Amino acid sequence: MGTEGLCRHRRNGATPKGAVRRDLRPVTGPGRSLLPAPRAPRAPASAPRRLPPAPARLRGRSSLGASRSGAAAGSLPSKMAESLPEHDRILQEIESTDTACVGPTLRSVYDDQPNAHQKFMEKLDACIRNHDREIEKMCNFHHQGFVDAITELLKVRADAEKLKVQVTDTNRRLQDAGKEVIAQTEEIIRCRVQQRNITTVVEKLQLCLPVLEMYSKLKEQMSVKRYYSALKTMEQLENLYLPRVSQYRFCQIMMENLPKLREEIKEISMSDLKDFLESIRKHSDRIGETAMKQAQQQKTFSTALQKQNNVNYGRNMHLGRNRILESKNEITLKRTFEDEDEHDEEVLTAQDLVDFSPVYRCLHIYSVLGDGEIFENYYRKQRRKQARLVLQPQSSMHETVEGYRRYFSQIVGFFVVEDHILHVTQGLVTRTYTDELWNMALSKIIAVLRTHSSYCSDPDLVLELKNLIVVFADTLQGYGFPVNRLFDLLFEIRDQYNETLLKKWSGLFRDIFEADNYSPIPVANEEEYRIVISKFPFQDPELDKQSFPKKLPMSQSVPQIYMQVKEFIYASLKFSESLHRSSTEIDDMLRKSTNLLLTRTLSSCLQNLIKKPHIGLTELVQIIINTTHLEQACKYLEDFISNITNISQLTVHTARLYGLSTFKDARHAAEGEIYTKLNQKIDEFIQIADYDWTMSESDGRASGYLMDLINFLRSTFQVFTHLPGKVAQTACMSACQHLSMSLMQMLLDSELKQISMGAIQQFNLDVIQCELFASSEPVPGFQGDTLQLAFIDLRQLLDLFMVWDWSTYLADYGQATSKYLRVNPSTALTLLEKVHRGMKDSSKKNNIFAQFRKNDRDKQKLIETVVKQLRSLVNGMSQHT
């Protein structure tokens, strides 16, 4: 039965016969033998005996088993008939069940009646015997065929031995013949293996060679410092070439080296960047100087071009008149173009002075490596540090213009580089960053310039500083940086520039005043006269009619002062240029600065000059004359400013010069100083007066000091002829009044205790000389006896004592028609007491003459009576007051 048949019998619950034999015990039982049975008659050799088909055999065995089972069942006692079907079922289960699952079946044997185990064993033995008998029958059935097969095999053994020998010999000969073939075959195999290996190597080398070539190219790029290309090569190696041959060791080494090479490139590029930063720090001043020079040249070119356009426009309107001016401007413009071309050839750009490739290379390298932000932060941080260093000025920068130029050049160079980086790179420097950096720098620059410019005392240096600031501002404005705050700073510096100009011109004015001889300017001929007129706008028709030689009324300082004022205006205008201001604003600035020069500097110099001790009356008179002519020249200065700025004086907002008030104040001060010096001179003469207050009789002539004083006044007033009439008259009146007051004080001096009548008479003679001087009209213009009224107080007082007309004085006192209206009771009382004491002293000395003694006593009694009345008047006046 086949496998499929066994499976079907097991599924149907039946077990094929013979299975128990294979599972439970050996095929041969005890006491049985497998020896062949007696031989049956042999079948013919041509028809060998064959086994019956498997189904027939199985059917035979099945029928045999059934018969045996039937016989066994018939032999059992009748008492076991009931348990037979149960035991058969158990045996069938044992035969049909696997050995691992036979336990429950066997257990059921023991679960039945007490003798069921013995009965089952008997049934089992019977079943075994039946199977043995079937096996034996089958063996007997096939034994003859087995014997025949063995017999045939023995017959074939001899032929097999012979065949074996033949085969061995043939094999030997075949082996001998195939040795050469085997050797050649092995050689072919070996060559085939080598060829296959070579082909494999070639294929692998074709994969590896591009990698090696790229790596060699990488090394070459590293050696020639082409780091950006080297990074690109690394990227190709990593992404394209190395993955194809990643299984090789050298590729792993390459992969390990690539990060190191990247770090090396980063370090090298960073080192190049540091060298670049150091280079631009050293070359910033040269870059800035170049940029400022180019900006200045461009401005000069634009100015010349504008002038040329103006000339062309004016040529159409005034062709004939402007032909010469046009040709001159064309020549100037041509020279400007030529100079511009020359400078273009000489001047280098920032790219020529500094190699920017390190910063480009470093930026690209860091961008490729993904560290662009780190590089940007580092670059900006380092540049901020350099900006702080650039903005830090030298302590002695204010001493020379070169210090300022170097300072500005470094700053311009710094921001020119930043602007270049801004426009040639993306993201490294942004407009926001540069604006922030510029605002920080601008605040620092303004603070530095405010501090250092305050130390400048030379206007030329301040002017050069202004020009540098303008060029500096124009240069940076051309690069897009706002510079309005710098021009606002220039207005602050302009005030300081004006202050330095005022200080300088103050020294110039002092030098002019010191060198002046304070005498009219002599001119010997027409040429000298025109030279003076060209310097100062003087017009005098009367003087023009005079023949040479002649003298101009002012001294040499007047044209010099006038020319210096014009030079000051020019100097102030120089600062106002290039400030991007309108003509009206420039005109206003010039007038304001000129007003400061006149009202403060020149006025102060004049006031100091007038107060100097060595300046005498002659000099003061000349100063008054000079200020008069300078005052008259102020209108020419206004015209001069208007011509410069092209702003009419009729404009509403045009300021006026305050020179009129300045020169008037100086003239008034000089006049006052004349009055003071005249009085001082009079006091000097008074101090040398030597009166003998006890003389009995006068000398009959005026005192010598007084005659000298009158002569001095007479000569002095002759000098006053060039002064305005009121000035000379005031000076003369002031001198006479002061002389009168000084003489009065001399009489009333408290240290003078007594005065004789002889001294009164001598004093009267001196006063008469003063009155004669006053009546001689030393200065023309006085009406009547106006000048003599300066001595009226002295005259009435002396007349009172000379006539001794006390009764009239006392009787008419207080009346408008009184003869002695100007005599004050206290003055009369003081002088009378001194005279009284003098008469007492005189009477004591002259007591020899008795007839005088009685007269003196009468006079003394009269004096005492008058004294009492005067005292009563004085007391009455004090009470009334």
Image: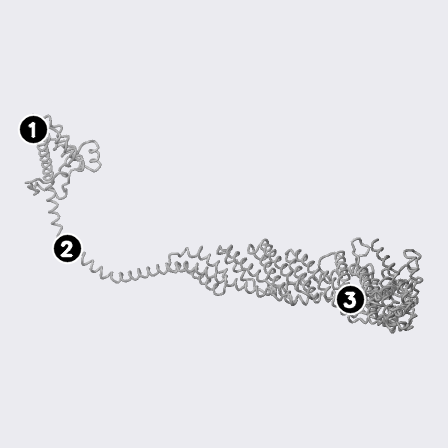
Answer yes or no: do the residues labelled 1 and 3 have beta carbons within 8 Å?
A: no
Direction from residue 792 to residue 581 in the image, left or right: left
Answer yes or no: do the residues labelled 2 and 3 have beta carbons within 8 Å?
A: no
Crowd rating for badge 1 (residues with CA inside 10 Å; few <14, some 14–19, many 20+): few
Closest to the camera, between mark 2 and mark 1, is 1
Circle 3 — which element? helix
Direction from residue 443 to residue 463 in the image, left or right: right
Which residue has dot 1 on it? 76
For residue 541, what is the image quadrant? bottom right
On the image, the x and y values in percent for residue 5 come to 20, 35
| Above or below, comparing residue 100 to residue 735 in the picture | above
Answer yes or no: do the residues labelled 2 and 1 have beta carbons within 8 Å?
A: no
The amino acid beneath tag 1 is Leu
Query: In front: 221, or 189?
Result: 221
On the image, the x and y values in percent for residue 573 come to 74, 62
For residue 97, what is the image quadrant? top left
Where the C terminus falls, by quadrant?
A: bottom right
Query: In front: 479, or 163?
Result: 479
For residue 700, what is the image quadrant? bottom right
Crowd rating for badge 3 (residues with CA inside 10 Å; few <14, some 14–19, many 20+): some
Name the residue rendered at 15%, 40% in the picture. 50
On the image, the x and y values in percent for residue 679 come to 83, 66
Which residue has dot 3 on it? 611
Q: Earlier in the sequence, mark 2 or mark 1?
A: 1
The amino acid beneath tag 2 is Lys
Which residue has dot 2 on it? 162
